[in-house]
Image (spheres, grey):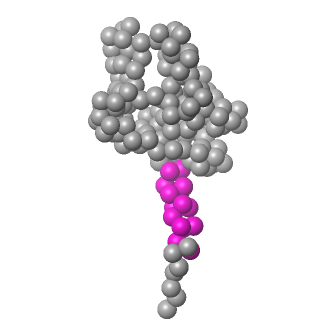
Amino acid sequence: MRQTTPSARPSVRPTRLLAATIEFLRRNHPFSDMESGHLEFLAKRLHTRYCPAGSRIECGDEIGGACLLIVKQGIVEIIRATRRSSRLLRPGDSFVIPPSGLRNSEGDGVEHVAGEDTFCLEVDHDALAELARKSDALRDFLTAAQVRHPEG
């Protein structure tokens, strides 16, 4: 009987996790329109973020660039103070948070708040910019998001 050493197991787990992440992305827009290589590029650069209920969600990026977040589990509420309205995002929904300097200088009045304990997948500004140059589907999504809601 062959024994598996502990060092041999980790190589299987990341492969399964990567495949599961790609499958999750593939079920949701705009990722359903992206090429497999682009999905793999994205999945390898995602970070999981825990957002406690009621917490404001901001980019984890120290340099303050825009970031893309994908709701993995839970609910995110987008609150627009100027319109006194809100919208709920559920698992699979994506949203872009603009650079912190842009939000502060324009006083956009938009907050992203965890409606319950929530996990998001986050891709930082640099990886997002690189992927947007490669993927027409992602670039179109980001452009449409900017047109619909320039401040976030």
Q: Is residue 11 above or below residue 80?
A: below
Horizontally, residue 42 falls left or right of residue 111, namely right
Residue 34 picture quarter: top right
Check the image and report above or below for 143 versus 52: above
Q: Magenta residues?
A: 8-23
Q: Nearer the viewer, residue 72 or 37?
A: 72
- 46 over 81 or under it: above or below: below
Task: Please name the predominant secondary structure of the magenta segment in the image.
Answer: helix
Q: Quick check: 96 left or right of 132?
A: left
Q: Is residue 143 above or below residue 50?
A: above
Residue 97 rendering spot, x and y as whole percentages: 50, 25
Residue at 38 percent of width and 7 percent of height:
82
Task: Examine the structure image and report whether residue 146 is included in the region drawn in magenta.
Answer: no
How many circles with numbers are drawn on the protein? Answer: 0
The residue under the point 40% across, 20% down is 111
From the top left corner, tell me how far across and down residue 6 is, in percent. Answer: 51, 75
